[in-house]
Amino acid sequence: MEANKIKSALADITAEKDPTLKSLKMASLCTALRAEYGVELVVVGGSAIEILTDGAYTSGDLDLCYTNKATLPLRQRQEVMSLLGAKGGPRNWEVAGMFVDVLGAAESFARTPFRRVQGPYGEVRLMKPEDLLVERVLVSVYPAKT
């Protein structure tokens, strides 16, 4: 992605007042950048729930995972995020006034396709709502107190 497009996208994201739209825009930008390196990302956890519910549930950060075997070496991950002016790393970043967590591989045994949403800088894939629901139920009871 060209430097001027990244700069324009970051200005747009930084100026965005709606936290849900800001997360969607950032997910779209991060996904587009990583795709140039053959890495597929998916929004997971509370971040996906926030986007799927149009902000009825808020996460406070953006959680992304890899969905294919392609990953980037640490140095390349840092170089990609530096294009965004991100601070931190190698998994947790602060960029454009928000926190972005680029975690490990997405964990899902479901065979249904990811939900897809069009973002301003490209398509964003979201973990399936049913997987998110099961995850939230599991987290609420596990580990159980003994």
Image (tube, rainbow, N blue to C red):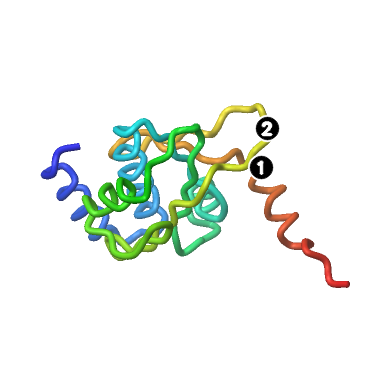
Task: Give the residue at mark 1.
Answer: 131
Q: Are marks 1 and 2 in contact (CB under 8 Å)?
A: yes
Disc 1 to disc 2, how far (Cα)? 8 Å
Determine which of the numbered discs, if any, sits on residue 40 in the image: none
Which corner quadrant holds the C terminus? Answer: bottom right
Relative placement, left or right, of 42 versus 75 is right
The answer to which quarter of the image holds residue 16 is bottom left
Of 75 and 22, nearer the camera is 75
Residue 71 in percent (x, y) is at 43, 39
Q: Nearer the viewer, residue 90 or 85?
A: 90
Q: Position of residue 51 (x, y in %)?
A: 48, 48
Query: Quarter-wise, where is residue 40 in the image?
Result: top left
Density class for disc 2 (Cα within 10 Å; few <14, some 14-19, many ≥20) is few
> In this orientation, which residue lies closer to the viewer: 28 or 1?
1
Q: Does residue 95 lie above or below 76 as drawn?
A: below
| In the depicted structure, whether residue 31 falls above or below residue 94 | above
Which of the two labelled residues, at mark 1 and mark 2, occupies the earlier sequence position? 2
User: Residue 56: x, y in percent?
Assistant: 53, 57
Q: Position of residue 32 (x, y in %)?
A: 31, 37
The residue tagged 2 is 110
Instruction: Give the residue drawn at x 19%, y 46%.
Output: 6
Q: Using the image, determine if residue 68 lies above or below residue 136.
A: above
- The residue type indicated by label 2 comes to Ala
Residue found at x 41% / y 61%: 92
Q: For the residue marked with disc 1, what is the amino acid? A: Asp
